[in-house]
Amino acid sequence: MPEERAKPEAETRISLLAIFLVFLKIGAFTFGGGYAMLPIIQEELVRRRRWVDQDTFIDNLVIIQSLPGAMALNKSILTGIKLRGPWGGVVAALGVVAAPVLVILLLAGLLLPLFREHAAVQAAFYGLRPAVVALILSATLDLGREIVRGWRAVVLVLFLMLLSLFFQPHPILIILAGGLAGLLIYRKGEEEKE
């Protein structure tokens, strides 16, 4: 008799509906997309629900940075697959895009033409911009504490940041430079010596 593949513990406990609702919440209450979504995604998946651990969260961020497409969508698909396989990925993706699509259709099709020139609407959008920057900085500092360990990592971050600010190369070149630097700097066993 062939032995059945053991299902992960999370797969038996987390319903597709729960996955959909959590990612619907993430998609509905995050403004600014991309990095601005990281604090909410991290709060929901790592801290509140404990669906993924911090190391998995960070590893997935590295992976999704090298994939085409929206970061939140890629993150939702990876998490959904981890929790419930391919259907979990589909349901998580639907959840994270459902609210923004509806909001965009509502705003672009109905409300924005009516209120585009309204002073209160313009003021609200001006207020949202600094809020998005604050969320991105918060995510950067939070992830930085987890990822940047040791003096080599600090020097590498500063070097890549200065390279990015002053020469503005394509982001893929920064990622490739970081990977190459990692190959040169962090040889097996040397990371533990820090």
Image (cartoon, rainbow, N blue to C red):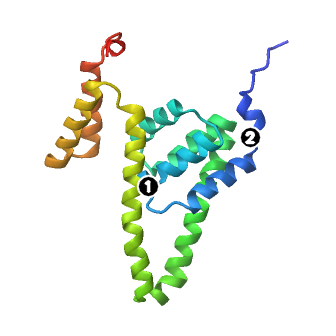
The N terminus, quarter of image: top right
Left or right: 36 as drawn, with respect to 18 = left
Mark 2 = which residue? Answer: 14
Q: Is residue 168 visible?
A: no
Q: Position of residue 79 (x, y in %)?
A: 59, 40
Real-space Cα separation, disc 1 to disc 2, in angstroms: 26 Å
Disc on res. 36: 1
Question: Looking at the image, which is closer to me, 48 or 179?
Answer: 48
Q: Which residue is found at the position 51% from the left and 36% from the top?
A: 57
Above-or-below relation of 183 to 162:
above
Q: Is residue 186 visible?
A: yes
The residue lying furthest to the left in this view is: 166
Question: Looking at the image, which is closer to me, 57 or 49?
Answer: 49
Query: In the rendered structure, which amino acid carries the disc numbered 1?
Result: Ala
Query: In the rendered structure, which amino acid carries the disc numbered 2?
Result: Ile
Q: Which residue is found at the position 49% from the left and 89% from the top?
A: 114
Above-or-below relation of 126 to 146:
below
Above-or-below relation of 129 to 175:
below
The C terminus, quarter of image: top left
Q: Count the marks.
A: 2
Within-10-Å neighbours for mark 2: few <14, some 14–19, many 20+: some
Secondary element under disc 1, as helix, strand or loop, is: helix
Is the Cβ of the residue at disc 1 closer than 8 Å to that at disc 2? no
Q: Which residue is found at the position 35% from the left and 11% from the top?
A: 188
Above-or-below relation of 125 to 135:
below
Q: Which badge, 1 or 2, is on the more N-terminal residue?
A: 2
The residue lying furthest to the right in this view is: 1
Secondary element under disc 2, as helix, strand or loop, is: loop
